[in-house]
Image (cartoon, rainbow, N blue to C red):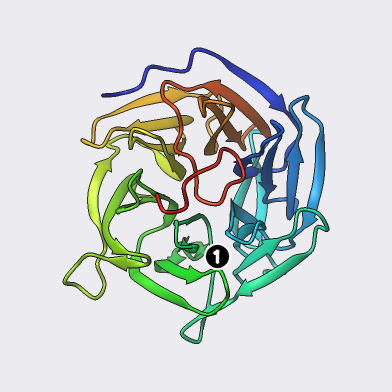
């Protein structure tokens, strides 16, 4: 089964500085990171924009953790250029401050760095994250690209109490969006330059069901067009909804690997999340135009673990 295009689409806020990492809140507002601004920002239903926290570097992905804080993948900061009026990241910033995983208290705006390294190796550019029901987080680190050289990427698992971080899969090409399937036994990762989505079977928190010590996943979908994949979310039917750059929208990939395009009108669409009373409202970060947009989605989204809205069974 594939989705029909959204029945409605509207611009909620403008003037955002490369928005990413949307998180829907109970009052109808949405948190986004502004990568070029270095902030976690709240957008109200009327389009007002307020900075919640100064994260520094380049906050990239965001998700609620089991401690009630919003956890951030921080890539350490990009350099920026403009292409046809659009902000474009062009590698690490001159004042690149190192990759890290942060946690933000929404009341005070206090930012705490939880992880900066794994096995003695510094994190490079953490990108996106998802929490499981056990309170652990999966996150991706694609590294940085510098002219003709780029880093190998990795898939990591860490505990929210700061006690453990592990690299689960290494040598990936641009791992970006990451999400869990509805039953929590499948993990999906989008590979940016390849425009592909891979999946891993899981047999427990942070554990890949594989005989290999460095399992690099199984292919779900490969986009044969001139396209680039960014972040993703999984909906309640197990469809992987991955943001696409160049084609500009969401590629809605069914569990059987068939897909349809959902255009947004912005060629640099970077992420999606679901909110509203029935999780049928999709919030889309459109970084080419610096906007947050909404769409009425074909199916309900998947309720995320630890997100205060809507509630979810933590054992689910």
The quarter holding residue 104 reads bottom right
What is the x, y in percent for residue 86?
65, 37
Q: Is residue 293 above or below residue 107?
A: above
Which residue is denoted by mark 1 in the rendering?
A: 125
What is the x, y in percent for residue 29?
71, 34
Q: Is residue 82 left or right of residue 164?
A: right
Q: Is residue 53 above or below residue 276?
A: below
Q: Is residue 107 left or right of residue 3?
A: right
* Residue 97 in view of the camera: no
Secondary structure under the numbered disc 1 in the rendered image: loop
The front one of 244 and 214 is: 214
* Residue 178 in view of the camera: yes
Q: Residue at horizontal 55%, vertical 41%?
A: 311
The front one of 64 and 76 is: 64
Q: Quadrant of the N terminus?
A: top left
Q: Residue at horizontal 82%, vertical 42%?
A: 50
What is the x, y in percent for residue 114?
63, 73
Count of picture labels: 1
The quarter holding residue 83 reads top right
What is the x, y in percent for residue 53?
78, 55
Q: Is residue 140 above or below residue 167?
A: above
Q: Residue at horizontal 42%, vertical 76%?
A: 166
Q: Is residue 12 left or right of residue 281?
A: right
Question: Badge 1: few (under 14), some or many (20 or more) residues near its Cα, within 10 Å?
Answer: many
The front one of 301 and 214 is: 301
The front one of 66 and 227 is: 66
Q: Is residue 112 left or right of residue 192?
A: right
Q: Residue furthest bottom?
A: 120
Q: Residue furthest top?
A: 7
């Amino acid at each position: 089964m594939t989705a029909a295009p959204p029945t409605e689409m509207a611009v909620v806020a403008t003037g955002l500085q490369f928005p990413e990492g949307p998180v829907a809140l109970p009052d109808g507002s949405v948190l986004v990171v502004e990568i070029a601004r270095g902030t976690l920002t709240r957008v109200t239903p009327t389009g007002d924009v307020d900075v919640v926290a100064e994260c520094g570097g380049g906050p990239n992905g965001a998700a609620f953790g089991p401690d009630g804080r919003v956890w951030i993948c921080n890539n350490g900061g990009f350099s920026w250029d403009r292409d046809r009026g659009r902000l474009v990241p062009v590698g690490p910033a001159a004042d690149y401050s190192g990759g890290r995983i942060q946690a933000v208290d929404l009341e005070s705006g206090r930012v705490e760095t939880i992880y900066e390294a794994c096995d003695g190796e510094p994190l490079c550019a953490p990108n996106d994250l998802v929490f499981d029901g056990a309170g652990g987080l999966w996150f991706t680190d694609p590294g940085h690209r510098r002219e003709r050289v780029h880093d190998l990427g990795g898939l990591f698992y860490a505990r929210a109490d700061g006690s453990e971080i592990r690299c689960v899969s290494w040598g990936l090409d641009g791992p970006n969006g990451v999400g869990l399937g509805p039953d929590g036994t499948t993990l999906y990762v989008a590979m940016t330059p390849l425009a592909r989505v891979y999946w891993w079977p899981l047999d427990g928190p942070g554990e890949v069901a594989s005989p290999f010590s460095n399992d690099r996943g199984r292919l779900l979908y490969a986009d044969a067009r001139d396209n680039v994949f960014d972040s993703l979310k999984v909906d309640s039917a197990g469809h992987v909804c991955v943001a696409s750059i160049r084609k500009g929208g969401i590629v809605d990939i069914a569990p059987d690997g068939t897909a349809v395009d959902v255009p947004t009108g912005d060629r640099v669409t970077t992420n999606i999340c679901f909110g509203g009373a029935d999780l049928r409202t999709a919030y889309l970060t459109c970084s080419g135009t610096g906007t947050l947009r909404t769409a009425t989605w074909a199916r309900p989204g998947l309720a995320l673990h630890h997100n205060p809205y809507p509630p979810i069974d933590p054992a689910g």
